[in-house]
Amino acid sequence: MAGKSEAFAGIGKIRYEGPASKNMLAFRHYEADAIVEGKPMRDHLRFAVSYWHTFRGTGSDPFGPGTMIRPWETESDPLKAALARVDVAFEFLEKLGVDFYCFHDRDVAPDGGTLAESNKHFDSVADRLEQHQKQTGKRLLWGTANLFSNPRYVHGAATSPNVETFAYAAAQVKKALEVTHRLDGAGYVFWGGREGYQCLWNTDMKREVDHLATFMHMAVEYAREIGFTGQFYFEPKPREPMKHQYDFDSATCINFLRAYGLEKHVKMNIETNHATLAGHEMQHELEYAGMQGFLGSIDANTGDTLVGWDTDQFPTNVYLTTQIMHSILKYGGLAPGGVNFDAKVRRESFEPVDLFHAHIGGMDAFAHGLKIAAAMRADGALQKLVDERYASWSGPLGKRIESGSESLASLEQEMLAKGEATPCKSGRQELFENLINTYL
Ligand code: XLS
Ligand code: NI
Ligand code: NI
C-alpha cells in the first residue's frame, strides 16, 4: 500500500465514537478492545470481509448488468487487476479495523484457462496476500474453492455424474487447501454450490451423496498430509441454485457428517439467509448445531421476507443479532471461527463509500447484539425462567429418567399409582418476549 494512491481517499480509519455519535462513518457499538464477558469484542466477533461480495460483486442481477463504481478497476489484464485489488482489499480491512477476510480461489485470482495456469495465478496472488498479511497482521478466516461457477460444474462438483468433474474439483480443492495453509488460514469451508438436484428422475441420490463424503474425506486427508490444522466447516443451504441441496440445514449436515464418519473433522458454518430459506430462524440453526457440538462459524447476513431468495443483505436488525450472539455466547464462542459478512451492498448502492456504511452497520449491529446478550446472561432472569419451566425434571422422577434408570414399565407403575399427571403450567411466551424487550 505504501506509496500508492488510496482507493478510498477521504475515508480515514473508522473509530468508535459511542452511541451518541452522529458520524455515520464511526462505530456506535463496536469497540474492538472493550471487554465483554472477560474477552475483547474483537475476539468474540472475529469479523471477516467476504472477498467475493465486497471486491468482486458487480451488482448484476437477472434483470440487468453490474452497477458498481469501482474506480480502482482499471487494469485490463486479469492477473494485474487481481493483484491491484489485493492492495485495495487490505486498505479496506485496515480502515475498517476488521481482522479477517474470506475468499474463494477464483475471487482472489483469475481463472487461467487451464488448471496449471489457474494455479500459477493463484500462487502469484497468494504472494501478494501473504505480503499484506505480514505487513498488517490481518488474517484469513477461511478459504474455499469455487466449485459452482464454471460450466464444468453444471451438475455439481463432488456430486456430478461426470467423474472428471469430480477429479477437477478435487484438484481445485487440493490447491485451495495449499494456499489456505500457506496463508495460515484459520479454516476451510465446504459450501455445496450445485451439490444437489433439479430432478430426481435423472439423479442417483445415494451415489451422489456417497461421492460428496468421499470428496470431503479426501480433503481432510490431504489437509493432514500438508499439516493444515485449521477447522473444516460445512455450510448449509437448502436450495438455490439447485431445487434441493444436500447441505439443506444444520440437522441434515450433521446427520451427513456422522453417517460418513466426518464428525471429528467438520463443524458448521451457518448463514442467516440460508437458515431462512430452510424455513428456520438463524437462532434455530445455531441452537441445533450448538447443542450437538457442531457450532463453528457464521456467515452474517440477512434475507428479506418479501423476496424469497438469498438476497445476502447486511444485517442491521439488533433483535436478530441479539438472538445470534446469545446462542454463540451460550455455546462458548466461535473461535477459531468468526463472523463473516457474506453480504453484499444493494445494486442501488453503487459507490465505494457504501461498502463502508454496509460493514459499519453490520459490525455495530453485532456489537450491539453482543452487549445485549451479555447483559441478559449477566442478569440471569431469562435463564431462571427457563429453569423454572423445566423444574419438574429436577425432581426425583426427572433425575431418574435423565440418568437412564427408568423404563416404560417402571413409568407405567408410577402413573398407575398417580392416576394422572400433574397439570402443566403456562408457557408464558408473551412474558418471555416482553422480558427480552426490556434489554433492548
Ligand atoms: C452462497 C454461499 C457461499 C459460501 C461460500 O450462497 O453463502 O457464498 O458462503 O462458498
Ligand atoms: Ni455463505
Ligand atoms: Ni449465501
Image (cartoon, grey):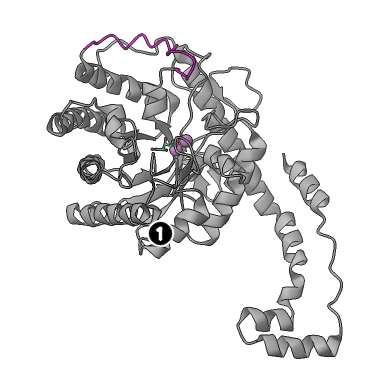
Mark 1 sits on what residue?
257
Q: Position of residue 217 (x, y in %)?
A: 28, 57
- State the residue at coordinates (65%, 32%): 305
* Above or below, 255 relative to 25: below
Q: Position of residue 162 (x, y in %)?
A: 26, 43
Q: Position of residue 92 (x, y in %)?
A: 39, 22
Q: Which three-letter amino acid code belongs to the residue tagged 1?
A: Leu
Q: Nearer the viewer, residue 320 or 78?
A: 78
Magenta span has 248? no
Identify the image quadrant of residue 416. bottom right
Q: Is residue 307 left or right of residue 233?
A: right
Ligand 1: give its quadrant. top left
Quarter holding the N terminus is top left
- State the residue at coordinates (42%, 26%): 53
* Above or below, 3 relative to 104: above
Quarter holding the C terminus is top right
For numbered disc 1, what is the local secondary structure? helix
Is residue 331 at all visible to an observer of this figure? no
Magenta span has 73? yes
| Residue extent of the magenta highlight | 60-76
Q: Position of residue 325 (x, y in %)?
A: 58, 45
